[in-house]
Image (cartoon, helix red, strand yellow):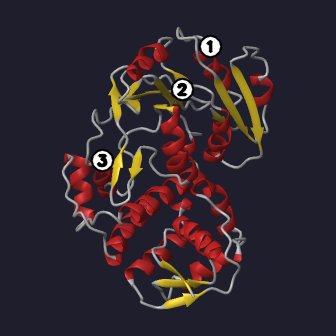
Amino acid sequence: MPTHNDGQYISKTIESVLSQTYKNWELLIMDDGSTDDTASLVNTFTDGRIRFFQQANLGQLMALNNVSSHISGDVVMMLHSDDLLYKPTSLEDNIQYFEDSSIDGIYCSIIQFYPSGKPDQVMVTSKSLGINAPQKLLLLLGSNFIPDPFFIRKEKFLSHVRYNYLQWNTQYWLDYKENSVQSLNLRYSDQPWYYYRIYEANYTNSIIGCFETFLGRLRVIFLLSDYYTVLFPSIQKELMRRFNIGITLPLAASNRRIAKSIAILIKNMKGRTPNAYTRYFEQVQHFYQHPNKKVIELKSKIESHYWGCDGRKFFNDLLNNELPDIYKELIVKLEDGFSSIKVTNIMEMDELKKILKFLCIRAAVVLK
């Protein structure tokens, strides 16, 4: 459970765990730099199964990432501190799925509730992930079509969720192979367990929440375009969204094809969350729209500073013109374009690959 200034709600959230009929659980709470009474409220609970940790305000994904090293259980789930477990049997109803050793994890339709008193609403999701889930994700330009809350085996959490979702802010269920991308074996549960609070202060309604969402979607386009091509992204996105119909070609997309998908993403972002928009997105689009065979060398020290979970810090550094020099230099060079970057050693190569992945830039890294 990540939490930040949720003192108004966290006691009820913890109580929804304490009320579970299934008793063999632990609750790991990471306080992400709260300045309200969150810590004192958590400390009123004396149940030894609750373990409380604190960090500076580094963001939700970093909070989850840092607390995950303390997991001792066999199955992991995520619960936000302003939400609830849906009913007292939520754990008991769903832990039984893991008697089937072939299942990696489960997901469900979320029940939304409104403090205003509006009736609960079921956020219906697809009942089958399907073998074409990565292609569907690309057609939807990285937009989630199954919700993030999950039950998942610890080994898959550490190998996939921690890397995909917590480190790189992409879908937790993606399973990258050497020459393909697949999905974990997730099963739909018809026993919903997640009670999601809908109110103005939802993280996804915040400026930084929206920026991180669209940065994650940009990264999905960047990563999956190495495996599939979407020919007409605007049309196919609508066909997939409305009718669950879409076609991809099983080959890497050209830079110009990627640029078309990014252009639609930018349009969506400006229409929905203009305050989260930064020119960085259009600079990336320009890079793909005008490919250049140029080979470049960098003047700045090649040292990575951000993982995908550092979207909050990147956003603030971008707005305050405090990006590390290597990131500033690369973003400026997007205007002219390049296809390869020369480095002097293996360490620089590894660091630069992480930087390019964070910035969603497709370029070869070669030794001099």
**Residue drawn 71% across the image and 29% down it:** 7
Q: How many marks?
A: 3
Callout 2: SS: loop
Q: Which residue is mark 2?
A: 74
Q: Is residue 9 visible?
A: no
Q: Quadrant of the C terminus?
A: bottom right
Query: x and y percent of residue 154 in the render?
Result: 53, 33
**Looking at this rendering, what residue extends furthest in the top direction?**
21
- In the rendered image, which quarter is residue 218 located in? bottom left
Q: Earlier in the sequence, mark 2 or mark 3?
A: 2
Q: Which residue is mark 1?
A: 18
Residue 343 versus residue 60 in the image, above or below: below
Amino acid type at circle 2 is: Asp
Q: Around disc 3, counting alpha carbons within 10 Å, would you say few (fewer than 14), some (14 to 19), or many (20 or more)?
A: some
Query: x and y percent of residue 268 in the render?
Result: 40, 60
Checking the image for residue 133, the label placed there is 3
Callout 3: SS: helix
Q: Is residue 38 left or right of residue 3?
A: right
**Residue drawn 19% across the image and 58% down it:** 247
